[in-house]
Image (spheres, grey):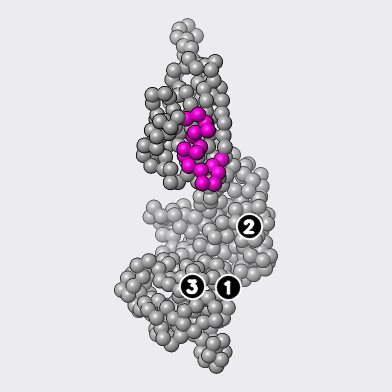
Amino acid sequence: MIKRKGIRVTGLLLFVEIIGLGLFSACKNTPSPVAASTPIEATYTDTLVQVTDVYGIPLGIYSIEEGKVRRNQTLSDLLQPLGITMQEIYKISLLPDSLVNERKIKQGNRYLFYTKADTISELPLHAETVFIYEKDHLNFVVISIDPDTIWARNGRKPVETRLKVASGTIETSLWESMLAEDANPMLAVELSEIFAWTIDFFGIQQGDRYKVIYEESYVDSNSLGIDKITGAWIYHNETDFWAIPFVQDSIRSFFDEQGNSLRKAFLKAPLRFSRISSGFSHSRYHPVLKIRRPHHGVDYAAATGTPVHTVGDGVITKVGYQKGGGGNYVKIKHNSVYSTTYMHLSGFGKGVRQGVYVKQGDVIGYVGSSGLATGPHLDFRFYKNGSAVNPLKVEAPPVEPVHETNMLAYGWTRAFTISWLKLLE
């Protein structure tokens, strides 16, 4: 049965897993059973030593104190109240930064202090005291402290990958819909990047629907983020849009139900999230000049400093300041037919200069209000054979589709993914 709102998927997956485990076991060489008369040497093992916690510390040997780093606390501030001597603290400070970097002790991070119980102090294999500092949700350092020895090791907590599903209807925005469905809102960003070439996310409407299957990693019930999307569907403008993952030429990409790549020659928009404040027009009233004149571009209102991405691969032909009102601008030639211009920038991306080759999605500047502008926005212009065209109506050709030799394998992947998505409510 498949459950929504972030609950793990069972049923079909469990069946597949059981089948897989059975096949794997059948392929292994089964060892011969030990004869009943074979003598077995008995050895004593303290079971307490064998069971460890998430940090690899034996359970039952130590008493544990824990806390969180307070504002402006240093490593010394944490260790001194725990009874660690200044000499021991000095030795700890000499450890490499890869183990303990005192400059990166962060407020709110968790630490633990292990003290060996007196009743088992005769166990020589374990340090008298152990200090653990969690660098983040995943990584930690273990510092073992004995009277004559200090040693440390880095560690990582076990990561649990959960297969999850989400589906819903958009009322205000894709982001808000994800929150309402108790799904990771970063799914909105992931989907906007997957469908960036086929759906204009500035045009998402009330009533549009979506379904998505994805993997998310967890440590201690804290999400580390979305690992990957394993299938997605969006219903927009009365059209079904499918995203089916498939590995071709060792690269994992997304394709539609016909096997066409979702990647196109040009992105639908140069900004991730914004709104269109002014469209393409042959006669628009200019808010600064107070006259009517052509506006052969699309204005995207966004906060100053919002990254601006090139919509396609190409060579930067011009970078500078346009005296006619465009302010800071970048012009890119994509091929012999198409070019784009990005105006009113507050600044340019790293390494952006004339003659530099850029790839689709590279940051070439930041939203601003340079030139003739009443507020921060991007004036984006698209040219075909030197003539301005409406960027919102450009139909970009797709990149390489699924190879004919891979269509059979892709067909199985497509059928499984679409069937699974259709099962979601």
Indicate the quadrant where residue 99 lies.
Answer: top left
* Kind of element beneath mark 3: strand
Indicate the quadrant where residue 355 lies.
Answer: bottom left
x, y percent for residue 362: 41, 66
341 shown above or below 54: below
| Image quarter of the N terminus | top right
Residue on which disc 1 sits: 275
Please tell me which of labels 1 and 3 falls first in the chain: 1
Question: What crowding class fits label 2: few (fewer than 14 Cα within 10 Å), some (14-19), or many (20 or more)?
Answer: many
Task: Kindly identify the residue that appears in the image at 51 percent across and 22 percent down.
Answer: 116
Amino acid type for the residue under numbered disc 1: Arg
Report, in whole angstroms, how far the alpha carbon at label 1 lies from the one at label 2.
Answer: 19 Å
Report, in whole angstroms, how far the alpha carbon at label 1 lies from the one at label 3.
Answer: 13 Å
Indicate the quadrant where residue 313 lies.
Answer: bottom left
Amino acid type for the residue under numbered disc 3: Val
What residue range appears in magenta? Answer: 68-84
* Kind of element beneath mark 1: strand
Task: Kindly identify the residue that appears in the image at 43 percent across and 87 percent down.
Answer: 324
Residue on which disc 3 sits: 367
Report, in whole angstroms, how far the alpha carbon at label 2 lies from the one at label 3.
Answer: 27 Å
In magenta segment, residue 79: yes
x, y percent for residue 54: 52, 33
Amino acid type for the residue under numbered disc 2: Met
Q: Which mark is residue 178?
A: 2
